[in-house]
């Protein structure tokens, strides 16, 4: 995609330079600029336009302040109709407010990519094409004859308002399922798997209008979609082989201010609910109907927000800016003691192995043709950790070369950087001051922290670990959204099946093609990058699927919701099989 022009001078620096001329004082150092940026994180319902000075070359403090401003604006109480709109008559963290927040009113992925037919409320009239219709989740009308609507479970009141939060993903993009030892496994009531984290993905008005426009109807994965994605894939293929032919339209290129959000939610214990440290909201989730081969039903309940990803295309970041936040109490030791404080400073286990047992990864190496010896391997082959109150995960049994069994989380693979910790301290101070000024006695937002933010692509040599001082930013990962070893240290691309049919490459990562050629995963004109973390992962959707960093566009129509599963029986969902099939189509 074309590179956009970076703004010439950061706004903050420009205003200070003018002042310096009048007072004959030296210009501020970058450290002083960053300090002042963090000291002025506003509590505002308005999204920041961009990182001051532009995303390319921005500092981590400046990017962190931008991320916090996004987080605050998107977690503002919303009008609901129109969607995506803050209610400026209400406060951030409004006491007693039970309605949706701004990002809640984005469309869930099945509201943009329905299992059958057109999106709920769709009209052919621009500019919004029916975007503001109330939430309704319509899957395949073949599997769900009532127009694609999933029926309520036994005992579920069908008259409740449709929850804005639709938890129709049960895994971390099919690689593993995630659980919280904090919730007693035998606790009564729904869901049937109370410890499991469930996930959802949403996108805003800009994405919806772009993909449902009758001129293209990209959401259907029809001929226009096929042509546009193939144009970009062809361009990337020739570029990665040393070619110089220009990228010609049509190709997928989301408009500026396109936002996608992914969130992790879970059932809370009684003690956690009473703590006031979690934001809670009504959610819809799905379960299998006992005795039915394909039957699925829905339940609604109030759950806690554990993590939130925000990716946004800004005027200077055509590759999107990737920010990820977590609730403060995600990482606990077996006895329930916090491993990090609310700002991300490590309190316990600084020298511990991140996983229990220790997971060792032998990376894939170049070979032509690729053989079993060139495939990534994990050890030990199996695990049986006793979680206590820790987080734990189970890799998909469809990926036998990854460690199987229960794997516990002791800490992050890469600690939260000091600059991000400083941003968290500054944001929490701003929230506390705002609360005091508005007589808000308590707010759950004081217990959420930025983990990291990627504002520009970085590069890594294939076959070698990244060792830069910004290693945590390069490998950016959320501990409850990208938990397993593959995702905590992601770079390269998803492994393509090799010629030997006896070797199952599902869910494995490589940095080399089947002919041993070094792979890249992000194109930002005029360069190709082997990027890590969130951006590198989403880059697979760009270079392998041609969908401009969007997994939900690459995944297409959502035929059915995914259901909660026990740790020992986590299958690879059909949607994920399809998506990984698309994303492993690298040259």
Image: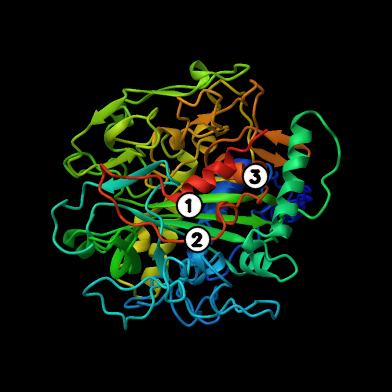
SS at badge 2: loop
The residue pinned by badge 2 equals 558
Return the disc, 2 or 3, that comes first in the chain's sequence. Answer: 3
Residue at 69% across, 58% down: 254
**Is label 2 in contact with label 3 (beta carbons under 8 Å)?**
no
Return the disc, 1 or 2, that comes first in the chain's sequence: 2
Q: Of discs 1 and 3, which sits in the foreground?
A: 1
Q: Residue furthest right?
A: 245
Q: Secondary structure at mark 3?
A: loop
Residue 404 horizontal side relative to residue 19, left or right: left
Q: Which residue is mark 1?
A: 575
- Residue 423 in view, yes or no: no
For the rendered model, the colour scheme is rainbow
Q: Is residue 83 visible?
A: yes
- Depth check: 53 or 83 in front? 83
Q: Tell me the residue at 50%/57% (across/down).
A: 68
């Amino acid at each position: 995609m074309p590179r956009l022009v970076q703004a010439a001078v950061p706004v903050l620096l420009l205003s200070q330079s003018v002042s310096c001329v009048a007072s004959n004082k030296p210009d501020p150092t970058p450290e002083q600029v960053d300090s002042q940026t963090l000291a002025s994180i506003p509590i505002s319902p308005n999204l920041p336009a961009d990182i001051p000075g532009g995303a390319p070359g921005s500092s981590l403090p400046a990017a962190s302040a931008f991320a916090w401003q996004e987080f605050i604006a998107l977690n503002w109480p919303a009008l609901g109709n129109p969607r995506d709109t803050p209610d400026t008559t209400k406060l951030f963290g409004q006491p007693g407010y039970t309605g949706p927040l701004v990002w809640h009113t984005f469309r869930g992925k099945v509201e943009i990519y329905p299992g059958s037919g057109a999106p709920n409320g769709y009209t052919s009239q621009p500019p919004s094409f029916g975007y503001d219709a109330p939430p309704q989740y319509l899957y395949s009308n073949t599997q769900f004859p009532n127009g694609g609507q999933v029926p309520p479970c036994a005992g579920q009141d069908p008259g409740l308002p449709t929850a804005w939060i639709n938890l129709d993903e049960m895994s971390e993009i099919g690689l593993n399922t995630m659980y919280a030892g904090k919730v007693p496994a035998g606790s009564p009531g729904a869901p049937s798997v109370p410890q499991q984290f469930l996930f959802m993905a949403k996108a805003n008005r800009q994405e919806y209008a772009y993909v449902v426009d009758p001129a293209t109807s990209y959401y259907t994965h029809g001929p226009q979609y096929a042509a546009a994605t193939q144009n970009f894939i062809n361009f990337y293929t020739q570029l990665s082989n040393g070619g110089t032919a220009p990228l010609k339209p049509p190709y997928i290129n989301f408009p500026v201010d396109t936002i996608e959000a992914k969130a992790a939610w879970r059932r809370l214990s009684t003690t956690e609910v009473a703590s006031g440290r979690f934001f809670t909201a009504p959610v819809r989730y799905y379960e299998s109907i006992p005795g039915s081969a394909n039957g699925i039903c829905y339940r609604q309940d109030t759950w806690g927000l554990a993590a939130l990803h925000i990716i946004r295309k800004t005027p200077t970041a055509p590759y999107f800016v990737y920010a990820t936040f977590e609730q403060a109490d995600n990482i606990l030791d077996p006895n329930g003691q916090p491993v990090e404080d609310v700002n991300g400073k490590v309190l316990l286990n600084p020298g511990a192995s991140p996983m229990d047992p220790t997971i060792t990864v032998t990376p894939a190496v170049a070979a032509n043709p690729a053989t079993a010896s060139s495939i990534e391997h994990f050890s030990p082959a199996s695990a049986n950790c006793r979680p206590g109150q820790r987080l734990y995960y189970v890799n998909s049994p469809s990926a036998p070369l990854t460690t199987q069994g229960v794997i516990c989380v002791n800490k992050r693979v890469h600690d939260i950087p000091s600059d991000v910790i400083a941003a968290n301290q500054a944001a929490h101070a701003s929230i506390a001051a705002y609360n005091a000024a508005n007589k808000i006695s308590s707010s759950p937002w004081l217990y959420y922290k930025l983990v990291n933010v990627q504002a520009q692509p970085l590069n890594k040599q294939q076959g070698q670990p990244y060792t830069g001082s910004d290693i945590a930013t390069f490998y950016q990962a959320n501990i409850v959204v990208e938990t397993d070893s593959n995702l905590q240290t992601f770079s390269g691309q998803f492994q393509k099946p090799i010629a030997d049919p006896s070797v199952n490459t599902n869910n494995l990562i490589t940095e080399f093609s089947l002919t041993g050629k070094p792979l890249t995963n992000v194109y930002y004109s005029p360069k190709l990058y082997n990027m890590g973390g969130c951006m590198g992962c989403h880059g697979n959707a760009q270079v392998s699927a041609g969908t401009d960093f969007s997994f939900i566009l690459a995944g297409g129509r959502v035929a059915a919701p995914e259901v909660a599963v026990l740790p020992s029986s986590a299958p690879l969902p059909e949607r994920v099989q399809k998506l990984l099939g698309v994303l492993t189509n690298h040259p």
